[in-house]
Image (spheres, rainbow, N blue to C red):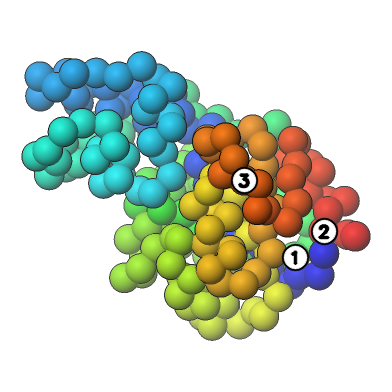
């Protein structure tokens, strides 16, 4: 698969953030007297940014919940978050240019990448608040390519949002099967991998 730059999703692709997100949201919902949800339901709501996460897991009003969640999660976003197997080793082996393209806020994304010693692998980190638009809007991809100066991207992600982003932008997408997707969401991906290190062979072929 020919490419000169790889656009990586973050949550569910490079790092397993589910426990910290679920525990942070549960504590905030309890603090506001809202019904809490099982971990699996919170994990299923991950993928479109913080506001969508809150909207999918509790009734309106949402603004205070979003604000409080950002504070709580920022303070604990590295407590249980960890790399998926072979991520660091594989990133070292991939010669292509790399950026992170996530709907998570930039500051949190950078904190996680710094804390897990991954930042040096990436030229740029684009968070959900880095641009006026976010995934799955195809203009996100076009803007990144224009700013970076690349023309043959591949997107690597774990969710329907990532697949839809790539399809909207007309670029190839490799879907990892271990992340936070719903059944059927990844069917349209060009390639499916069950381990991160399989990227090396995919991008050599």
Q: What is the secondary structure assignment of the residue under circle 2?
A: helix
Cα separation between marks 2 and 3: 19 Å
The part of the image, by quadrant, that contains residue 19 is: top left
Q: Which residue is mark 1?
A: 96
User: Residue, x 46% and y 42% (percent of image)?
Assistant: 112
* Image position of 199 (left or right of 43): right
Compared with 39, 186 (above or below) is below
Indicate which label's residue lies in the foreground, 1 or 3: 3
Compared with 84, 39 (above or below) is above
Disc marking residue 203: 2
Determine contact: label 2, label 1, CB under 8 Å.
yes
Indicate which label's residue lies in the foreground, 2 or 1: 2
Sequence-wise, the earlier of marks 1 and 3 is 1
Neighbour class for label 1 at 10 Å: few (<14), some, many (≥20)? Answer: some
Disc marking residue 6: none
Query: Looking at this view, is 141 or 27 the one in front?
Result: 141
User: Residue, x 65% and y 69% (percent of image)?
Assistant: 171
Disc marking residue 186: 3
User: Residue, x 19% and y 41% (percent of image)?
Assistant: 66
């Amino acid at each position: 698969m020919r490419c000169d730059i790889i656009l990586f999703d973050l949550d569910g692709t490079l790092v397993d953030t589910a426990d910290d997100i679920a525990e942070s949201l549960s504590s905030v919902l309890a603090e506001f007297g809202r019904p809490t949800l099982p971990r699996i339901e919170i994990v299923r709501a991950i993928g479109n940014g913080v506001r969508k996460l809150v909207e999918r897991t509790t009734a309106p009003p949402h603004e205070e919940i979003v604000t409080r969640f950002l504070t709580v999660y920022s303070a604990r976003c590295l407590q249980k978050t960890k790399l998926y197997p072979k991520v660091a080793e594989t990133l070292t082996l991939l010669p292509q240019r790399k950026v992170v393209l996530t709907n998570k806020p930039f500051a949190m994304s950078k904190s996680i990448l710094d804390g897990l010693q991954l930042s040096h692998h990436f030229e740029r980190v684009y968070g959900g608040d880095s641009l006026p638009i976010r995934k799955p809007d195809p203009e996100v991809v076009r803007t990144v390519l224009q700013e970076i100066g690349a023309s043959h991207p591949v997107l690597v992600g774990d969710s329907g949002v990532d697949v839809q982003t790539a399809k909207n932008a007309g670029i190839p997408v490799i879907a990892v099967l271990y992340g936070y997707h719903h059944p059927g969401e990844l069917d349209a991906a060009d390639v499916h991998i069950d381990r991160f290190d399989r990227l090396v062979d995919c991008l050599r072929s």
